[in-house]
Image (spheres, helix red, strand yellow):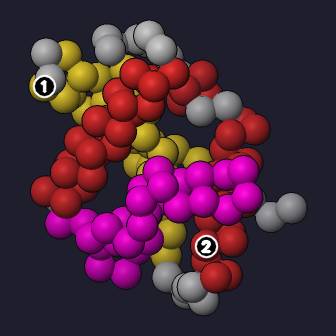
Amino acid sequence: MSKRSNVIFGKQGEKAALEFFQNKGYKLLHKNWRHRKSEIDLIVKKHNKIVFVEVKTRHNTINQTVNEMVSISQQNRIMNAAHNYINTYCLDEEIRFDLIQITLCNNSPNFNHYKGFMYPTLQ
């Protein structure tokens, strides 16, 4: 699959993930929010909780652990971007980091939602 095809495929997954969260009552705050070389795929809110979402889109179900899907270095980049987002918007709300794995098969998405897949740490 070409790089362009991968980008289009990933965008389809992000669109499906956004619909998944909106159907559960979440409101979109930002999509593909960037800070330097880091990106957060979706930032959504429900009640007083901000959720930073990493989206992983696959063609078929692959048995992987969370750390295989999102490396420690990628988790650190997400955490850094989230920290910057919180400071930029002066947020004082509860936060959570979710991972959503989407398997697109025959244009029908299947979802694995991992709530709180990582936790902020003090450095």
User: Callout 2, which amino acid?
Assistant: Tyr
Q: Is residue 12 above or below residue 26?
A: above
**Residues drawn in magenta:** 25-52
Q: Secondary structure at mark 1?
A: strand
View extreme (right): residue: 123
Classed neighbour count for the residue bearing mark 2: other residues with Cα under 10 Å, few (<14), some (14–19), many (≥20) = some
Q: Give how far apart the Cα atoms at labels 1 and 2 are.
A: 32 Å
- Evaluate whether residue 121 shows in this view: yes
Q: Quadrant of residue 72?
A: top right
Based on the picture, tell me whether residue 94 belongs to the magenta stretch.
no
Q: Position of residue 117 (x, y in %)?
A: 51, 44
Residue that badge 1 annotates: 108
Q: Secondary structure at mark 2?
A: helix
* Residue at 64 percent of width and 82 percent of height: 88
Q: Quarter of the image for the N terminus: give it.
A: top left
* Residue at 59 percent of width and 52 percent of height: 39
What kind of secondary structure does the magenta stretch mostly adopt? Answer: strand
Circle number at residue 85:
2
Q: Quadrant of residue 10?
A: top left
Classed neighbour count for the residue bearing mark 1: other residues with Cα under 10 Å, few (<14), some (14–19), many (≥20) = few
Q: Quadrant of residue 11?
A: top left
Q: Quarter of the image for the C terminus: give it.
A: bottom right
* Residue at 40 percent of width and 21 percent of height: 5
Q: Is residue 76 above or below residue 64?
A: below
Q: In the image, 44: left or right of 2?
A: left
- Evaluate whether residue 112 shows in this view: no
Q: Position of residue 36 (x, y in %)?
A: 73, 58
